Image (cartoon, coloured by chain):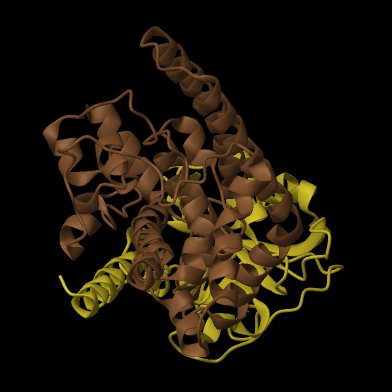
Chain colours: A yellow, B brown
Protein backbone atom coordinates (compact mmCIF):
# COMPACT_ATOMS: atom_id res chain seq x y z
CA UNK A 1 0.00 0.00 0.00
CA UNK A 2 1.30 3.45 -0.87
CA UNK A 3 2.13 5.85 1.92
CA UNK A 4 -0.85 8.13 1.32
CA UNK A 5 -3.28 5.21 1.17
CA UNK A 6 -1.74 3.80 4.35
CA UNK A 7 -2.22 7.12 6.13
CA UNK A 8 -5.82 7.33 4.93
CA UNK A 9 -6.45 3.79 6.15
CA UNK A 10 -4.92 4.72 9.50
CA UNK A 11 -7.23 7.71 9.76
CA UNK A 12 -10.17 5.45 8.92
CA UNK A 13 -9.25 2.82 11.52
CA UNK A 14 -8.77 5.55 14.12
CA UNK A 15 -12.15 7.04 13.30
CA UNK A 16 -13.90 3.68 13.50
CA UNK A 17 -12.33 2.73 16.86
CA UNK A 18 -12.99 6.20 18.26
CA UNK A 19 -16.57 6.13 16.99
CA UNK A 20 -17.20 2.70 18.47
CA UNK A 21 -15.93 3.89 21.83
CA UNK A 22 -18.69 6.50 21.81
CA UNK A 23 -21.35 3.82 21.70
CA UNK A 24 -19.75 1.64 24.37
CA UNK A 25 -22.20 0.53 27.07
CA UNK A 26 -21.17 3.05 29.72
CA UNK A 27 -21.61 6.06 27.45
CA UNK A 28 -24.70 4.69 25.72
CA UNK A 29 -26.20 4.16 29.12
CA UNK A 30 -25.39 7.70 30.14
CA UNK A 31 -26.69 9.33 27.00
CA UNK A 32 -30.05 7.59 27.12
CA UNK A 33 -30.53 8.21 30.76
CA UNK A 34 -33.10 11.01 30.45
CA UNK A 35 -35.91 8.47 31.04
CA UNK A 36 -34.96 8.80 34.69
CA UNK A 37 -37.83 11.29 34.61
CA UNK A 38 -40.29 8.71 33.42
CA UNK A 39 -39.23 6.26 36.07
CA UNK A 40 -40.17 8.67 38.77
CA UNK A 41 -43.92 8.72 38.41
CA UNK A 42 -44.23 8.51 42.13
CA UNK A 43 -44.70 11.47 44.40
CA UNK A 44 -42.31 10.99 47.21
CA UNK A 45 -43.25 12.64 50.41
CA UNK A 46 -39.80 12.52 51.93
CA UNK A 47 -39.59 16.23 51.96
CA UNK A 48 -39.35 16.97 55.60
CA UNK A 49 -35.90 18.38 55.82
CA UNK A 50 -34.36 19.43 59.09
CA UNK A 51 -35.27 23.06 59.56
CA UNK A 52 -31.97 24.00 61.13
CA UNK A 53 -29.93 23.09 58.04
CA UNK A 54 -29.57 25.50 55.19
CA UNK A 55 -29.54 23.83 51.82
CA UNK A 56 -28.98 25.60 48.57
CA UNK A 57 -31.63 24.29 46.26
CA UNK A 58 -32.04 25.33 42.71
CA UNK A 59 -35.67 25.78 41.86
CA UNK A 60 -36.48 25.04 38.26
CA UNK A 61 -39.70 25.32 36.39
CA UNK A 62 -39.08 23.20 33.32
CA UNK A 63 -41.88 20.72 32.97
CA UNK A 64 -39.84 17.69 31.85
CA UNK A 65 -36.86 18.22 34.10
CA UNK A 66 -36.21 15.68 36.82
CA UNK A 67 -35.70 16.91 40.34
CA UNK A 68 -34.50 15.42 43.54
CA UNK A 69 -36.62 15.75 46.59
CA UNK A 70 -35.36 14.30 49.79
CA UNK A 71 -33.41 14.57 52.95
CA UNK A 72 -30.58 17.06 52.89
CA UNK A 73 -27.81 17.82 55.37
CA UNK A 74 -24.38 19.41 55.42
CA UNK A 75 -22.26 16.78 57.09
CA UNK A 76 -18.80 15.19 57.02
CA UNK A 77 -18.63 12.54 54.28
CA UNK A 78 -17.87 9.90 56.87
CA UNK A 79 -21.35 10.48 58.34
CA UNK A 80 -23.15 9.53 55.13
CA UNK A 81 -24.24 6.11 56.52
CA UNK A 82 -26.12 7.94 59.30
CA UNK A 83 -27.89 10.08 56.71
CA UNK A 84 -28.98 6.88 54.97
CA UNK A 85 -30.42 5.64 58.26
CA UNK A 86 -32.34 8.90 58.68
CA UNK A 87 -33.50 8.64 55.10
CA UNK A 88 -34.89 5.12 55.58
CA UNK A 89 -36.54 6.10 58.85
CA UNK A 90 -38.29 8.98 57.10
CA UNK A 91 -39.21 6.62 54.30
CA UNK A 92 -40.81 4.14 56.67
CA UNK A 93 -42.81 6.86 58.37
CA UNK A 94 -43.93 8.79 55.34
CA UNK A 95 -43.78 6.74 52.24
CA UNK A 96 -43.86 3.10 53.09
CA UNK A 97 -46.32 2.06 50.47
CA UNK A 98 -44.70 3.92 47.60
CA UNK A 99 -42.25 1.55 46.01
CA UNK A 100 -39.47 3.49 44.28
CA UNK A 101 -37.05 2.16 41.76
CA UNK A 102 -34.26 4.65 42.25
CA UNK A 103 -32.58 6.60 44.98
CA UNK A 104 -30.25 9.42 44.12
CA UNK A 105 -27.60 10.96 46.31
CA UNK A 106 -26.30 14.39 45.41
CA UNK A 107 -23.14 15.84 46.94
CA UNK A 108 -22.90 19.63 46.61
CA UNK A 109 -20.70 22.32 48.07
CA UNK A 110 -17.97 19.77 48.55
CA UNK A 111 -15.13 21.10 50.67
CA UNK A 112 -11.72 21.36 49.05
CA UNK A 113 -10.35 18.47 51.07
CA UNK A 114 -13.42 16.34 50.25
CA UNK A 115 -14.21 15.93 53.92
CA UNK A 116 -17.61 17.66 54.01
CA UNK A 117 -20.49 18.31 51.65
CA UNK A 118 -24.17 19.13 51.48
CA UNK A 119 -25.69 15.77 50.81
CA UNK A 120 -29.20 15.10 49.61
CA UNK A 121 -30.69 11.63 49.50
CA UNK A 122 -34.02 11.26 47.79
CA UNK A 123 -36.12 10.08 44.92
CA UNK A 124 -36.23 11.57 41.45
CA UNK A 125 -39.51 13.36 40.80
CA UNK A 126 -41.16 15.62 38.26
CA UNK A 127 -42.24 19.04 39.35
CA UNK A 128 -45.96 19.36 39.90
CA UNK A 129 -48.40 21.67 41.60
CA UNK A 130 -48.15 19.69 44.79
CA UNK A 131 -44.41 20.10 45.14
CA UNK A 132 -44.05 23.43 43.40
CA UNK A 133 -43.04 25.29 46.52
CA UNK A 134 -40.92 22.56 48.00
CA UNK A 135 -37.13 22.64 47.83
CA UNK A 136 -36.05 20.62 44.81
CA UNK A 137 -32.66 20.01 43.25
CA UNK A 138 -32.47 19.76 39.49
CA UNK A 139 -30.81 16.51 38.45
CA UNK A 140 -28.50 17.11 35.47
CA UNK A 141 -28.47 14.47 32.75
CA UNK A 142 -25.81 11.82 32.98
CA UNK A 143 -24.55 12.84 29.56
CA UNK A 144 -23.36 16.13 31.04
CA UNK A 145 -21.39 14.39 33.76
CA UNK A 146 -18.25 12.33 33.80
CA UNK A 147 -18.68 8.69 34.69
CA UNK A 148 -16.64 7.65 37.71
CA UNK A 149 -18.11 4.23 38.31
CA UNK A 150 -20.20 2.28 35.83
CA UNK A 151 -23.54 0.70 36.60
CA UNK A 152 -23.17 -2.46 38.62
CA UNK A 153 -23.10 -3.98 42.07
CA UNK A 154 -20.48 -2.08 43.98
CA UNK A 155 -19.36 -2.22 47.56
CA UNK A 156 -19.20 0.93 49.67
CA UNK A 157 -15.43 0.66 49.39
CA UNK A 158 -15.62 0.66 45.59
CA UNK A 159 -17.92 3.66 45.63
CA UNK A 160 -15.55 5.50 47.93
CA UNK A 161 -12.56 4.47 45.81
CA UNK A 162 -14.27 5.82 42.67
CA UNK A 163 -14.05 9.34 44.11
CA UNK A 164 -10.32 9.17 43.41
CA UNK A 165 -11.23 9.47 39.74
CA UNK A 166 -12.32 13.07 40.18
CA UNK A 167 -10.01 15.40 38.27
CA UNK A 168 -8.39 17.43 40.99
CA UNK A 169 -7.53 20.24 38.61
CA UNK A 170 -11.21 20.96 37.93
CA UNK A 171 -13.78 22.67 40.12
CA UNK A 172 -16.41 20.16 41.18
CA UNK A 173 -20.02 21.25 40.99
CA UNK A 174 -21.60 18.07 42.29
CA UNK A 175 -21.18 14.34 42.54
CA UNK A 176 -24.22 12.14 41.99
CA UNK A 177 -24.78 8.54 42.98
CA UNK A 178 -27.60 6.73 41.19
CA UNK A 179 -28.85 3.70 43.09
CA UNK A 180 -31.22 1.22 41.51
CA UNK A 181 -33.37 -0.36 44.20
CA UNK A 182 -34.35 -3.99 44.50
CA UNK A 183 -37.78 -5.29 45.46
CA UNK A 184 -36.98 -4.65 49.12
CA UNK A 185 -36.19 -1.01 48.44
CA UNK A 186 -32.47 -1.48 49.03
CA UNK A 187 -29.73 -0.36 46.62
CA UNK A 188 -29.08 -3.12 44.10
CA UNK A 189 -26.80 -1.50 41.56
CA UNK A 190 -25.12 1.87 41.60
CA UNK A 191 -23.26 4.28 39.41
CA UNK A 192 -21.37 7.46 40.11
CA UNK A 193 -20.97 10.67 38.13
CA UNK A 194 -19.10 13.89 38.71
CA UNK A 195 -20.15 17.26 37.30
CA UNK A 196 -17.63 20.04 36.97
CA UNK A 197 -18.42 23.73 37.16
CA UNK A 198 -18.77 25.64 33.86
CA UNK A 199 -18.96 22.27 32.05
CA UNK A 200 -15.18 21.87 32.42
CA UNK B 1 -14.59 -20.90 29.49
CA UNK B 2 -17.71 -19.10 30.68
CA UNK B 3 -15.68 -17.80 33.59
CA UNK B 4 -13.11 -16.38 31.17
CA UNK B 5 -15.76 -14.77 28.97
CA UNK B 6 -17.47 -13.36 32.05
CA UNK B 7 -14.15 -11.96 33.28
CA UNK B 8 -13.48 -10.33 29.91
CA UNK B 9 -17.03 -8.97 29.81
CA UNK B 10 -16.70 -7.61 33.32
CA UNK B 11 -13.37 -6.02 32.54
CA UNK B 12 -14.65 -4.32 29.40
CA UNK B 13 -17.70 -2.82 31.06
CA UNK B 14 -15.86 -1.87 34.24
CA UNK B 15 -14.75 1.70 34.83
CA UNK B 16 -11.44 2.58 36.43
CA UNK B 17 -10.02 5.56 38.26
CA UNK B 18 -6.94 7.48 37.15
CA UNK B 19 -5.22 6.30 40.31
CA UNK B 20 -5.88 2.65 39.54
CA UNK B 21 -4.46 3.16 36.03
CA UNK B 22 -1.28 4.72 37.41
CA UNK B 23 -0.90 1.99 40.03
CA UNK B 24 -1.47 -0.74 37.44
CA UNK B 25 1.16 0.72 35.14
CA UNK B 26 3.66 1.01 37.98
CA UNK B 27 2.99 -2.55 39.10
CA UNK B 28 3.34 -3.93 35.58
CA UNK B 29 6.54 -1.92 35.00
CA UNK B 30 8.17 -3.17 38.20
CA UNK B 31 7.22 -6.80 37.77
CA UNK B 32 7.95 -6.88 34.08
CA UNK B 33 11.54 -5.84 34.65
CA UNK B 34 11.94 -8.84 36.95
CA UNK B 35 10.42 -11.13 34.33
CA UNK B 36 12.68 -9.70 31.62
CA UNK B 37 15.75 -10.20 33.82
CA UNK B 38 14.76 -13.82 34.49
CA UNK B 39 14.32 -14.46 30.76
CA UNK B 40 17.63 -12.78 30.01
CA UNK B 41 19.45 -15.04 32.46
CA UNK B 42 17.74 -18.02 30.83
CA UNK B 43 18.96 -16.80 27.43
CA UNK B 44 22.52 -16.45 28.71
CA UNK B 45 22.45 -20.01 30.05
CA UNK B 46 21.15 -21.20 26.69
CA UNK B 47 23.95 -19.35 24.86
CA UNK B 48 26.46 -20.88 27.27
CA UNK B 49 25.19 -24.39 26.50
CA UNK B 50 25.41 -23.65 22.78
CA UNK B 51 28.93 -22.29 23.33
CA UNK B 52 27.88 -18.93 21.88
CA UNK B 53 28.34 -16.93 25.04
CA UNK B 54 31.23 -14.47 24.81
CA UNK B 55 32.69 -11.64 26.85
CA UNK B 56 31.74 -9.31 24.05
CA UNK B 57 28.12 -10.40 24.25
CA UNK B 58 28.12 -9.86 28.01
CA UNK B 59 29.74 -6.45 27.57
CA UNK B 60 27.22 -5.53 24.91
CA UNK B 61 24.36 -6.58 27.22
CA UNK B 62 25.79 -4.55 30.10
CA UNK B 63 26.05 -1.56 27.77
CA UNK B 64 22.39 -2.01 26.84
CA UNK B 65 21.42 -1.73 30.48
CA UNK B 66 23.60 1.37 30.89
CA UNK B 67 21.73 3.04 28.02
CA UNK B 68 18.52 2.18 29.88
CA UNK B 69 19.96 4.01 32.87
CA UNK B 70 20.76 7.02 30.65
CA UNK B 71 17.15 7.04 29.45
CA UNK B 72 15.78 6.83 32.98
CA UNK B 73 17.95 9.78 34.02
CA UNK B 74 16.65 11.78 31.05
CA UNK B 75 13.06 10.82 31.92
CA UNK B 76 13.65 11.99 35.47
CA UNK B 77 14.15 15.49 34.09
CA UNK B 78 11.66 15.58 31.22
CA UNK B 79 9.03 13.09 32.43
CA UNK B 80 6.98 15.61 34.36
CA UNK B 81 6.88 18.02 31.41
CA UNK B 82 5.88 15.11 29.14
CA UNK B 83 2.99 14.02 31.35
CA UNK B 84 2.08 17.63 32.18
CA UNK B 85 1.74 18.51 28.51
CA UNK B 86 -0.46 15.47 27.95
CA UNK B 87 -2.69 16.45 30.89
CA UNK B 88 -2.84 20.09 29.74
CA UNK B 89 -3.75 19.07 26.19
CA UNK B 90 -6.40 16.68 27.54
CA UNK B 91 -7.93 19.31 29.81
CA UNK B 92 -7.93 22.11 27.25
CA UNK B 93 -7.87 20.79 23.72
CA UNK B 94 -9.34 17.29 23.63
CA UNK B 95 -12.40 16.78 21.44
CA UNK B 96 -14.10 14.81 24.19
CA UNK B 97 -13.20 12.94 27.36
CA UNK B 98 -13.80 9.24 27.10
CA UNK B 99 -14.64 7.37 30.31
CA UNK B 100 -11.87 5.15 31.65
CA UNK B 101 -13.56 1.83 30.95
CA UNK B 102 -12.27 -1.55 29.78
CA UNK B 103 -13.58 -0.78 26.28
CA UNK B 104 -11.70 2.51 26.24
CA UNK B 105 -8.48 0.83 27.37
CA UNK B 106 -8.87 -1.81 24.64
CA UNK B 107 -9.54 0.85 22.00
CA UNK B 108 -6.65 2.94 23.24
CA UNK B 109 -4.31 -0.05 23.13
CA UNK B 110 -5.22 -0.74 19.50
CA UNK B 111 -4.74 2.89 18.52
CA UNK B 112 -1.57 3.23 20.61
CA UNK B 113 -0.19 0.23 18.74
CA UNK B 114 -1.14 1.82 15.43
CA UNK B 115 0.49 5.08 16.55
CA UNK B 116 3.58 3.09 17.50
CA UNK B 117 3.74 1.56 14.00
CA UNK B 118 3.91 5.05 12.47
CA UNK B 119 6.33 6.33 15.05
CA UNK B 120 8.61 3.38 14.41
CA UNK B 121 8.33 3.82 10.65
CA UNK B 122 9.13 7.50 11.12
CA UNK B 123 12.25 6.64 13.14
CA UNK B 124 13.53 4.66 10.15
CA UNK B 125 12.51 7.21 7.55
CA UNK B 126 14.79 10.16 8.24
CA UNK B 127 18.29 10.90 9.43
CA UNK B 128 17.26 13.04 12.39
CA UNK B 129 15.18 10.30 14.04
CA UNK B 130 17.49 7.50 12.92
CA UNK B 131 20.25 9.21 14.91
CA UNK B 132 18.56 8.04 18.10
CA UNK B 133 16.91 4.85 16.89
CA UNK B 134 20.10 3.50 15.28
CA UNK B 135 21.39 2.95 18.83
CA UNK B 136 18.73 0.29 19.38
CA UNK B 137 19.69 -1.42 16.10
CA UNK B 138 23.44 -1.19 16.54
CA UNK B 139 23.88 -4.29 18.66
CA UNK B 140 25.30 -7.25 16.74
CA UNK B 141 23.36 -9.51 19.12
CA UNK B 142 19.68 -10.17 19.64
CA UNK B 143 18.56 -10.90 23.17
CA UNK B 144 16.22 -9.42 25.78
CA UNK B 145 18.82 -6.85 26.85
CA UNK B 146 18.73 -5.32 23.35
CA UNK B 147 15.15 -4.24 24.08
CA UNK B 148 16.64 -1.93 26.70
CA UNK B 149 19.21 -0.40 24.35
CA UNK B 150 18.00 3.18 23.99
CA UNK B 151 19.15 6.30 22.17
CA UNK B 152 19.30 9.84 23.55
CA UNK B 153 16.03 11.09 21.98
CA UNK B 154 13.99 7.89 22.28
CA UNK B 155 11.67 9.69 24.72
CA UNK B 156 11.12 12.66 22.42
CA UNK B 157 9.61 11.36 19.18
CA UNK B 158 6.85 9.16 20.67
CA UNK B 159 5.27 12.27 22.21
CA UNK B 160 4.11 13.55 18.82
CA UNK B 161 2.57 10.23 17.83
CA UNK B 162 0.62 9.66 21.05
CA UNK B 163 -0.57 13.27 21.41
CA UNK B 164 -3.38 12.74 18.85
CA UNK B 165 -4.84 10.08 21.16
CA UNK B 166 -4.98 12.64 23.96
CA UNK B 167 -6.71 15.09 21.62
CA UNK B 168 -9.23 12.39 20.73
CA UNK B 169 -10.21 12.22 24.38
CA UNK B 170 -8.25 9.32 25.82
CA UNK B 171 -7.17 9.96 29.38
CA UNK B 172 -3.42 10.78 29.46
CA UNK B 173 -2.69 8.04 31.99
CA UNK B 174 -4.53 5.47 29.90
CA UNK B 175 -2.46 6.53 26.88
CA UNK B 176 0.77 6.34 28.89
CA UNK B 177 -0.22 2.90 30.18
CA UNK B 178 -0.99 1.63 26.67
CA UNK B 179 2.25 3.19 25.38
CA UNK B 180 4.06 1.23 28.08
CA UNK B 181 2.20 -2.00 27.26
CA UNK B 182 3.17 -1.70 23.58
CA UNK B 183 6.81 -1.23 24.61
CA UNK B 184 6.78 -4.06 27.13
CA UNK B 185 5.20 -6.49 24.68
CA UNK B 186 8.09 -5.89 22.31
CA UNK B 187 10.68 -6.47 24.97
CA UNK B 188 9.84 -10.16 24.89
CA UNK B 189 10.32 -10.27 21.11
CA UNK B 190 14.04 -9.62 21.37
CA UNK B 191 15.08 -13.23 21.54
CA UNK B 192 16.52 -15.99 19.41
CA UNK B 193 15.19 -18.59 21.82
CA UNK B 194 11.72 -18.69 20.26
CA UNK B 195 11.80 -19.75 16.63
CA UNK B 196 8.23 -19.69 15.37
CA UNK B 197 4.88 -19.49 17.14
CA UNK B 198 1.67 -21.16 15.88
CA UNK B 199 0.56 -19.83 12.50
CA UNK B 200 -2.52 -17.89 13.72
CA UNK B 201 -0.34 -16.08 16.25
CA UNK B 202 2.30 -15.27 13.61
CA UNK B 203 -0.48 -13.99 11.35
CA UNK B 204 -1.91 -11.50 13.79
CA UNK B 205 0.73 -10.68 16.37
CA UNK B 206 4.28 -9.44 16.21
CA UNK B 207 6.55 -12.33 17.21
CA UNK B 208 10.26 -12.90 17.83
CA UNK B 209 10.55 -14.17 14.25
CA UNK B 210 8.98 -11.00 12.80
CA UNK B 211 11.08 -8.78 15.02
CA UNK B 212 14.33 -10.54 14.13
CA UNK B 213 13.56 -9.55 10.54
CA UNK B 214 13.13 -5.95 11.67
CA UNK B 215 16.60 -5.97 13.26
CA UNK B 216 18.26 -7.51 10.24
CA UNK B 217 20.78 -5.93 7.91
CA UNK B 218 19.95 -8.40 5.12
CA UNK B 219 18.87 -6.35 2.11
CA UNK B 220 15.44 -7.96 1.71
CA UNK B 221 14.63 -7.33 5.37
CA UNK B 222 15.49 -3.61 5.46
CA UNK B 223 12.69 -1.28 6.65
CA UNK B 224 10.29 -4.11 7.36
CA UNK B 225 8.13 -5.20 10.30
CA UNK B 226 7.67 -1.96 12.22
CA UNK B 227 4.81 -3.39 14.29
CA UNK B 228 4.52 -3.19 18.05
CA UNK B 229 1.92 -5.74 19.11
CA UNK B 230 -0.09 -6.40 15.94
CA UNK B 231 1.82 -7.41 12.80
CA UNK B 232 -1.38 -6.80 10.84
CA UNK B 233 -0.34 -3.14 10.39
CA UNK B 234 2.73 -4.24 8.42
CA UNK B 235 0.72 -6.73 6.42
CA UNK B 236 -1.86 -4.02 5.68
CA UNK B 237 0.58 -1.24 4.78
CA UNK B 238 2.99 -3.36 2.74
CA UNK B 239 5.99 -3.35 5.07
CA UNK B 240 5.87 -7.00 6.09
CA UNK B 241 8.64 -9.53 5.46
CA UNK B 242 8.75 -13.14 6.58
CA UNK B 243 11.84 -14.59 8.21
CA UNK B 244 13.38 -16.96 5.68
CA UNK B 245 17.08 -16.29 5.18
CA UNK B 246 19.18 -16.30 8.36
CA UNK B 247 19.25 -12.87 9.96
CA UNK B 248 22.39 -10.76 10.36
CA UNK B 249 21.98 -8.13 13.07
CA UNK B 250 23.38 -4.63 13.53
CA UNK B 251 23.90 -1.49 11.46
CA UNK B 252 26.34 -0.38 8.78
CA UNK B 253 28.99 0.65 9.50
CA UNK B 254 29.36 -1.47 12.63
CA UNK B 255 30.34 0.45 15.72
CA UNK B 256 32.38 -2.40 17.25
CA UNK B 257 32.28 -1.01 20.75
CA UNK B 258 30.78 -1.77 24.11
CA UNK B 259 31.59 1.68 25.45
CA UNK B 260 28.16 2.91 26.66
CA UNK B 261 28.87 6.55 25.78
CA UNK B 262 30.04 5.67 22.28
CA UNK B 263 27.05 3.39 21.75
CA UNK B 264 24.59 5.94 23.13
CA UNK B 265 25.79 8.93 21.12
CA UNK B 266 27.24 7.33 17.99
CA UNK B 267 24.10 7.98 15.92
CA UNK B 268 24.14 11.72 16.45
CA UNK B 269 27.94 11.96 16.42
CA UNK B 270 27.88 10.37 12.98
CA UNK B 271 25.03 12.64 11.83
CA UNK B 272 26.91 15.72 13.07
CA UNK B 273 30.04 14.61 11.19
CA UNK B 274 28.00 14.13 8.03
CA UNK B 275 26.40 17.55 8.47
CA UNK B 276 29.80 19.14 9.07
CA UNK B 277 31.32 17.64 5.94
CA UNK B 278 28.24 18.18 3.77
CA UNK B 279 28.96 20.00 0.48
CA UNK B 280 25.98 22.38 0.74
CA UNK B 281 22.91 23.31 2.78
CA UNK B 282 20.52 21.31 0.61
CA UNK B 283 22.64 18.21 1.26
CA UNK B 284 22.45 18.96 4.99
CA UNK B 285 18.67 19.21 4.81
CA UNK B 286 18.50 15.95 2.92
CA UNK B 287 20.65 14.29 5.58
CA UNK B 288 17.99 15.21 8.13
CA UNK B 289 14.88 14.31 6.20
CA UNK B 290 15.94 11.46 3.93
CA UNK B 291 16.23 7.82 5.08
CA UNK B 292 19.67 6.81 6.39
CA UNK B 293 20.31 4.75 3.24
CA UNK B 294 20.26 8.02 1.25
CA UNK B 295 23.46 9.26 2.89
CA UNK B 296 25.04 5.83 2.56
CA UNK B 297 24.32 5.75 -1.19
CA UNK B 298 25.64 9.31 -1.70
CA UNK B 299 28.84 8.43 0.17
CA UNK B 300 29.32 5.34 -1.99
CA UNK B 301 28.76 7.41 -5.13
CA UNK B 302 31.46 9.90 -4.15
CA UNK B 303 34.02 7.21 -3.32
Q: Is residue A74 left or right of residue B288?
A: right
Q: Eyeballing the image, is A172 above or below B106?
A: below
Q: Residue drawn at (74%, 46%), measured in percent from left and top?
A: A82
Q: Residue at x 19, y 77 (%)?
A: A5
Quarter of the C terminus of chain B within the rendering: bottom left
Residue A138 position in % (x across, y down):
58, 79
Q: Residue furthest bottom?
A: A61
Q: How many marks?
A: 0
Question: Is the N terminus of chain B in the top left, top right, bottom left or bottom right quadrant?
Answer: top left
Residue B261 point in image, percent of width and height: 67, 47
Q: Is residue A185 visible?
A: no
Position of B268 compared to A180: left or right? right
Horizontal placement of B177 versus A52: left or right? left
* Image location (x, y in percent) of residue B229: 33, 47
Q: Residue at x 51, y 17 (%)?
A: B41
Q: Residue at x 61, y 30 (%)?
A: B62
Up-down: is B156 above or below B213?
Answer: below
Quarter-of-image position of residue B223 = bottom left
Residue B72 visible in the current orientation: yes
Q: What is the residue that sits farthest to the right in this orientation?
A: A52
Query: For residue B25, what is the image quadrant?
Result: top right
Which residue extends farthest front? B303
Residue B251 is situated, as x and y percent measured from the top left of the image, at 41, 49
Q: Which residue is at the far top?
A: B49
Amino acid sequence: MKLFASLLTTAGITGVVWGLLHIQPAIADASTEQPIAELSTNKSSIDKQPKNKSVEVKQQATANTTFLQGLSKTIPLEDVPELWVDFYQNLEVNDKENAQQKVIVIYQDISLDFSEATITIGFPIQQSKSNKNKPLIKIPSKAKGTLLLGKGEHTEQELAHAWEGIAILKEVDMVIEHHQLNQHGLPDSSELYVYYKNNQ
Amino acid sequence: MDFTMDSIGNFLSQTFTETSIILTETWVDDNFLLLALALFIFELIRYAFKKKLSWNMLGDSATNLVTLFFLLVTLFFVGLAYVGTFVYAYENFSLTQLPISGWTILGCLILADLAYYWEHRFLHSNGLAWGTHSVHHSSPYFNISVAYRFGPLDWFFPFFFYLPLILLGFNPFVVLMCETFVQLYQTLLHTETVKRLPRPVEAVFNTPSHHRVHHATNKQYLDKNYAGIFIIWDRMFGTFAKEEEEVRYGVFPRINSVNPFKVYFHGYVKLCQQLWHAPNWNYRLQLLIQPPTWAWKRERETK
